[in-house]
Image (cartoon, helix red, strand yellow):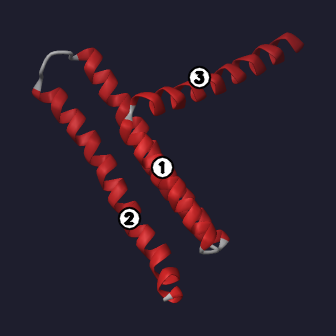
Amino acid sequence: MLKGKVSKTHSTLLSFGYAFSGIKTALRNEPNIRIHLVLALLAGVLAFFLNFSPTEWIILAFTIAFVLILELINTTLETIVDIVSPELNEQAKLAKDVSAAAVFISALLAVIIGAFLYLPKLSSLL
């Protein structure tokens, strides 16, 4: 019984290791993820100085996570498409373009949400 728990714990720790390895690999190889992360950090710093409420922090965190998650999914899909279809292929291009469009739409949504969060606070400073 104890052996099963140790094995399960070890498996869980390995899963975390794989997840962190994936994040590290994405940050190293994908410029768009680095751009989104820098913008997220800047948004967080500005939110700190604008004294965001807990609700505003949650909205900001979910918005940032949404964009980063879609960027990671896009990277995964593009990698799989490149493996399955290394030659030029219209359907492979379609899959990559649609996946990139999802990231683009999420980034636009993040800008809109950011405007709702930041503009009232910034305008009150003027």
Hey, what amino acid is under mark 2?
Val
Q: Residue 109 vs residue 81: left or right? A: right
Q: Say above or below: 93 vs 45.
A: above
Residue appearing at x 24%, y 34% in the figure: 96
Element type where label 1 sits in the image: helix
Hey, what amino acid is under mark 1?
Val
**Lower position in the chain sequence, tag 1 or tag 2:** 1
Please name the residue that numbered disc 3 is placed on.
18
Please name the residue that numbered disc 1 is placed on.
38
Please name the residue that numbered disc 2 is placed on.
111
| Mark 3 neighbour class, 10 Å CA radius: few under 14, some 14 to 19, many 20 or more | few
Percent across and percent down for residue 62 are 53, 57
**Which quarter of the rendering shows the N terminus?**
top right
When asked about the image quadrant of residue 44, the answer is: bottom right
Q: Residue 3 vs residue 18: left or right? A: right
- Residue 1 visible in the snapshot: no
The residues tagged by marks 1 and 2 sit, at their Cα atoms, a distance apart of 14 Å
